[in-house]
């Protein structure tokens, strides 16, 4: 088995599939029955998820800026919805 691609404490981006999320590797010692390494990543809010190496890459400053901008838009929408009592798409 190859050495882990990421160490505990590394900041990563889940970069495949329908969603991309920044997080921190909190465990890199999981192994599947097929011998593939699994990494546990903690995302904002404290929730964790397990990924294979191929789903993660090193987090960049640019990633943080994009995520911050997206989260601000989402949170602004929540504030508007709570203030008006109306869901923006209904």
Image: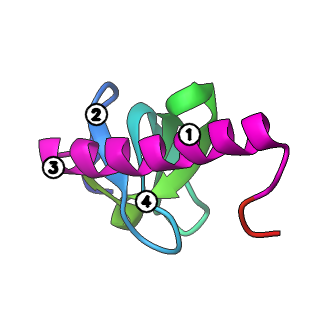
Residues marked 3 and 4 touching at CB (< 8 Å) = no
Q: Nearer the viewer, mark 1 or mark 3?
A: 1
The quadrant of the rendering that contains the C terminus is bottom right
Q: Residues within 10 Å of mark 4 (few under 14, many from 20)?
A: some
**5 left or right of 25?**
left
Residues 18 and 81: in front is 81
Does the magenta-highlighted stretch encompass residue 66?
yes
| Label disc, if present, on residue 20 of the rendered structure | 4
Residues 37 and 15: in front is 15
Q: Residues within 10 Å of mark 2 (few under 14, many from 20)?
A: some
**24 left or right of 83?**
left
Residue 9 location in percent, x, y? 31, 25
Residue 52 location in percent, x, y? 45, 60
- Which residue has dot 1 on it? 75
Earlier sequence position, callout 1 versus callout 3: 3
Q: Nearer the viewer, mark 3 or mark 4?
A: 3
Earlier sequence position, callout 2 versus callout 1: 2
Kindly report the distance in space between the C-alpha atoms of the residues bearing marks 3 and 4.
13 Å
Kindly report the distance in space between the C-alpha atoms of the residues bearing marks 3 and 2.
21 Å
Q: Please indicate, yes or no, whether residue 10 appears anywhere in the rendered image.
A: yes
At a point 65% along the width and 36% down the height, the residue shown is 79
Q: Please indicate, yes or no, whether residue 3 appears anywhere in the rendered image.
A: no
Earlier sequence position, callout 3 versus callout 4: 4
Residues marked 2 and 1 touching at CB (< 8 Å) = no
């Amino acid at each position: 088995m190859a050495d882990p691609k990421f160490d505990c404490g590394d900041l990563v981006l889940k970069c495949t599939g329908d969603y991309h999320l920044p997080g921190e590797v909190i465990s890199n010692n999981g192994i599947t029955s097929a011998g593939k390494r699994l990494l546990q990543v903690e995302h904002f809010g404290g929730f964790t998820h397990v990924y294979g190496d191929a789903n993660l890459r090193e987090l960049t400053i640019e990633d943080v800026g994009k995520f911050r901008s997206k989260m601000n838009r989402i949170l602004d929408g929540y504030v508007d919805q709570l203030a008006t009592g109306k869901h923006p798409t209904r």
